[in-house]
Image: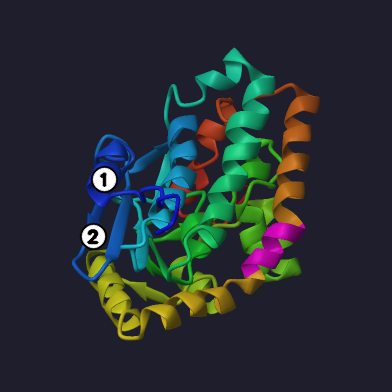
Amino acid sequence: MSLQKFLPTPKFEEYQDLFKDHFKLERRANGVILAQAHTLGESTQLSVENHRAVGQLFKTVGADPENEVFIFTGTGDDFMMRIDPEGFKLEHDDVSHWAYEYAYKDGRINVASLINDLEIPTIGVLNGPGFHSELCLMCDITICAADAVIFDPHYIAGSVPGDGIHSCLQELLGTKRAAYALLTGQAIDAQQALEYGLVNEVWPKAQLLDRAWKLADHIMSQARVTRRMTTQIIRRPWKQRIVDNLDGGFGIQMFAHAAKKEVVHTSGRARNVLAYVREGKQNCFD
């Protein structure tokens, strides 16, 4: 007998309760787990708290060997179209601490954990328009609602687009289309997203989760080792993209914040920049 024991792995019932204020978690008997991000039971409002919770969730789900397929989505009519009114107060309290602790570190962990720590197939379900859609777009399969809109609002809000969605768009759109999207805040609707290869399928909102469960059941039809090793094959481009772009992009973005001595998330520009998406415009200046 070994001189030491295995450390305990996370138990679903425990982390289901732990994450309940950020994610509604459901797991079926076959190990397919669904995570629905929310704020007070409705669509997510961005804050440093839920920003950190994303990476913590991915690491925890990935550490539980009873999870076999991961479905990630939002709640309500949009994926993430608002900022918590007090969600970035910590920026004002200590900008230099925030720039590393909540932005650079947490943000990198969120994206890297999705690719590296979840060694099970992932299905992203973009339930409507929203920023930080890379959390769904970088899943192995991505489906979206017919009213979904994908965009990067950073440049329009006065920030450098370098915190994850930029890398996602560069990988999926290519250099030229990504440059246009990053500089103009282009609002890419669901049909364009399908044509550009950002998503795999477009469905009416009411049918999204049924479709996700069906896809998960198909994935579960193969042996466990086949499923898990297949993720190692299909994630290789993402892993290389993270190594080449993610850390540097975040560093450049944080340098710009520090150089301008400005907190962008709570600026008037950031709170108004989403209006052009809600109004159905292609970009901020049309």
**Could you tell me which residue is drawn at 60 percent across and 54 percent down?**
165
Q: Is residue 148 magenta?
A: no
Give the x, y percent position of residue 162: 69, 47
**Could you tell me which residue is drawn at 63 percent across and 67 percent down?**
238
Marks 1 and 2, Cα distance to the nearest angstrom? 9 Å
- Secondary structure character of the magenta stretch overall: helix
- Label number found at residue 16: 1
Q: As drawn, is 91 to the left or to the right of 141?
A: right
**In which quadrant is the N terminus drawn?**
bottom left
Q: Quadrant of residue 200?
A: bottom left
Give the x, y percent position of residue 212: 30, 71
Most foreground residue, 195 or 75: 75
* On screen, residue 108 above or below 126: above
Query: What residue range appears in magenta?
Result: 238-244
Question: Among all residues in the image, which is located at the extreme top?
Answer: 93
Q: Is residue 241 magenta?
A: yes
Circles 1 and 2 in contact, beta carbons < 8 Å: yes
Most foreground residue, 238 or 11: 11
Q: What kind of element bears circle 1?
A: helix
Q: Does residue 196 appear in this view?
A: no
Q: As drawn, is 140 to the left or to the right of 178?
A: left
- Label number found at residue 27: 2
Q: Residues within 10 Å of mark 2 (few under 14, many from 20)?
A: some
Q: What kind of element bears circle 2?
A: strand
Q: Earlier in the sequence, mark 1 or mark 2?
A: 1
